[in-house]
Amino acid sequence: MRVEAERRLLHPLPARQLQGESARLQAVWRRFVNGSSNVSMQVLIVEDEEALTTLLRYNLEAEGFLVDSAARGDDAELLLAERIPDLVLLDWMLPGLSGIELCRRIRARRETERLPVIMLTARGEEGDRIRGLGTGADDYIVKPFSVPELLARIRALLRRAKPAHVSDRLAAGDLELDRTGHRVRRGGEELHLGPTEFRLLEFLMLAPGRVFSREQLLDGVWGHDVYIDERTVDVHVGRLRKALNGPRQADPIRTVRGSGYAFDETFSLDA
């Protein structure tokens, strides 16, 4: 298979060397996809063939992606309910919930209706391709495949999915953030946030509904090369909540047990 050939051509590095190389490539990739932003891109692999998942994970992590995986469609659906990735690589034939049904459910859910999905499957008949794309897949790749081509397609899809322009003003409910003036208002009243709390709120508001792990928040807010304890995130989230929330105001920062934090754009104005 071409996949196996790619495995032989991509000589794995020793673990220590791979860790350093992955960090370097991650920084390059973030600059390429996100401009000045240093947000780590996350890919969810939904594939029941363990060897293929390992191959995909190795190559994606070498390109700087954060990778999660599930071998069953129903397990992937649970992961998507907890944390929304930047892109899904989805096999069709899965135990439990099929890939085609999972794709349909992804498109039916408001939080994931625009989530990029690439179907990666052995089903290569024209009718299968039409059905996969018609169900909502953004791209359809037949096994065996070329790993470099897959990575190129992922990059192209993420470029198209990236908003062309992000407004200098972010707003949700009665909360407003002025990115240029570095000001935050709630209910028309200006709030006083420290620089770290401002960057943390800005980072979360740029991706409403998406759950970020502490590691992702450290990378996105503090920078990839800063080595501090992950619990520092909890301290600053606490300070941010104290600055944002009055006695009768709902908390827009949602804690997801075991996963991290998200900005809830649907928070109500009154608790």
Image (cartoon, grey):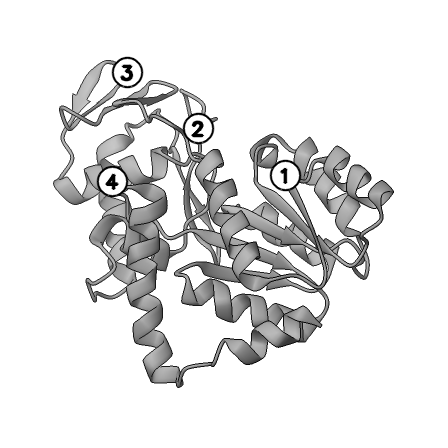
Residue that mark 4 sits on = 240
Using the image as rendered, state which of residue 42 and residue 256 is in the foreground. Answer: 42
The span from disc 3 to disc 2 (Cα, nearest Å) is 15 Å
Q: What residue type is labelled 2?
A: Glu
Q: Earlier in the sequence, mark 1 or mark 3?
A: 1
Vertically, is 107 above or below 32? above
Residue 64 location, quadrant: bottom left
Residue 63 appears in the rendering: yes
**CA–CA distance in space, label 3 to label 4:** 16 Å
For marks 3 and 4 on the same chain, the one whose residue lies earlier in the sequence:
3
> Is 51 or 175 nearer to us in this picture?
51
Give the SS element for disc 4.
helix
Q: Nearer the N terminus, badge 1 or badge 4?
A: 1
In contact (CB < 8 Å): disc 3 and disc 2: no
- Residue 138's mark? 1
Which corner quadrant holds the N terminus?
A: bottom right
Name the quadrant containing residue 264. Answer: top left
Instruction: Give the residue at x 73% y 46%.
Output: 102
Residue 187 image label = 3
Residue labelled with disc 2: 265
